Amino acid sequence: MDTATLVLIILAIIYVPIWVWVWRRPEDAARFHLVKYGPLVMIKTHLGIKSMDKLGKYRRFWLVFGFVSKLISAGLFFIMMYMLIGAIIALPSRIGHGGIGIQYALAIPGFNPMLPLTYGIVALFVAMIVHEMAHGIQSRANGCKVDSTGLLYGVVPWGAFCEPNEEELAKLPRRPQMDIYSAGISVNTVVAVISIALMLAVCGSITPSSFDSNADDDSDSDLPGIYYIDSYSPAFDSDIPTSALITGIKEVGEDSFHHVEAYIGSNSISLISPDLELSPLNEYVLQYVLKDGVKKESTPIQMGALIKSVTNNSPASSAGMLPLTYLYSMTNTSVTGSETEYIQNTNEFMDYMKTTHAGDVVLVTVATIADGGDIETVDYEITLTASGSQGYLGISVTESGFTFTTPTAMLERATTPFAHVENPIDFVKSLLSYLSGPVNGLDPIPDSITWWYDTPNGDLTWIIVKMLYWLFWLDILLAISNALPAYPFDGGFLFEGGINWLLERLGIKDTERRGKLSGSISNAISTVTLMMFILVIVGLLI
């Protein structure tokens, strides 16, 4: 049992008696501002209500903001559904690959591996407070009282709440109700936009540091850096740590190191040397530098396109190809006069596959370690199947187990998330890719490689950047998740209001009938959406 699960069990054991006490003795619990709320406990206060009253006086502003809020919520609704449907479609491919762990399901800084303790607590606190304040301010702007504010607790904190007076809220027309429900989503979005704009402005002062490598005038060269190393790979056995910058390479037996460069392909980044043709038939020593600036040397390692995995029932699997062997060469025997292509890295393999088609017979030569320790080659004659318009072999490859990047490439990813956006779908994909950063250890630049860069104010710059990043990340995630068209999310109530409006436009003028019909439709959609949401969460965890 891991530590996270043990802590969760202990917290649950502590929480259950508290919940039972609040349930059995509500009058005593009320003196401590505790109220049962389903399986949760509400900690009720009146904090912030006076501020809501003051800010809610600017009713004309909040009327306009309500209109904008509904547009923002509608946009995030489509993004949320795009994410949910995409996750459902991808779910079968995750079966058998293991889950990420229960700790990822809870947005608890320090407990969830993605959320840092300090930045996470501050950003989560801000996101929840502005969300609930927005509901309260919009309630007061529309003449609805706020009875209480506070915290929802159930084993762990579930979030903050703002409780408008239910009777007064129910009597409001549809427009102000939807303004109130959409307020939290839109304010979180505004905070997220401001945060990322400020973060990008600060990042403009960050530049890659200059490192001396083995070229004559390359002190400012963008050296290949190691971001990730696959376990049980040649890279793992090379003794090079992640975050190292590669400054040179030489074949075993050579005296001096050659200059290295990063080749940025469409799929990955490869390490190349203009003065040395790499081959998996040879072994090489890599020279690298860490934060201390001292150059070190790796143990000998093969370099090239390492076969990381072979897909079941693929042409490569049927031919008997094995993981942890290197691609050496490929020849398309179906094309008369086709030349043999020697594969130095993953990008050359990807580029070669783009020239193939289904039905092509390709002679694939791999390099492997024989029983005596020598490197030998093995040939496979394989008939390709289809992958879109090109041939499909059925292997995934890596740079000897390394995932390479460069200081410039990492900085560009952090500061230009929408650089290649051409249409709304590209924007959504780029946003989701950027939001996935913490899953891959990005926030937006990992602490382990901040030494790759020069900053005007040292560590203070990184503190500001990371704080703004987490404000952006948690606010936009809270906004998107609340746009889910399911109760008790804000999106569930907004969806019901939208259906009510649509039914009115379709000619159903009877208010009571329209309300019942929109409620029934919304309940059905909410149930299905929640089931989908829970299925995705369970699929990620187990």
Image (tube, grey):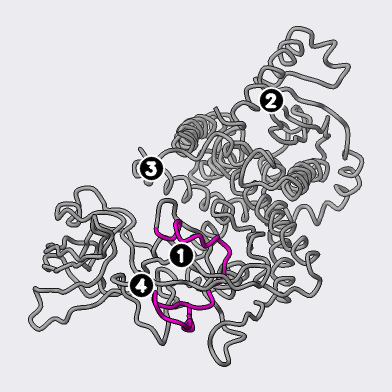
Looking at the rendered image, the disc whose residue lies closer to the viewer, 1 or 3, is 1
Tag 2 residue: 154
Tag 1 residue: 299
Looking at the rendered image, the disc whose residue lies closer to the viewer, 3 or 2, is 3
Side (left or right) of 266 relative to 224 = left
Tag 4 residue: 347
**Quadrant that contains the N terminus:** top right
Tally of marks: 4
Q: Which residue is drawn at 46% across and 32% down?
A: 531
Magenta segment:
234-261
Residue nearest the observer in this picture, 431 or 385: 385
User: How many angstroms separate mark 3 from mark 4 (CA)?
Assistant: 26 Å
Q: Which of marks 2 and 4 is nearer the N terminus?
A: 2
Tag 3 residue: 94
Q: Residues within 10 Å of mark 1 (few under 14, many from 20)?
A: some
Residue nearest the observer in this picture, 334 or 36: 334
User: How many angstroms separate mark 4 from mark 1 (CA)?
Assistant: 24 Å
Q: Residues within 10 Å of mark 3 (few under 14, many from 20)?
A: few
Q: Which of marks 3 and 4 is nearer the N terminus?
A: 3
The amino acid pointed to by label 4 is: Asn
Q: Quadrant of residue 514?
A: top right
Determine contact: label 4, label 1, CB under 8 Å: no
* Residue 178 in magenta stretch: no
How far across and how far down the image is residue 101, in percent?
A: 52, 36
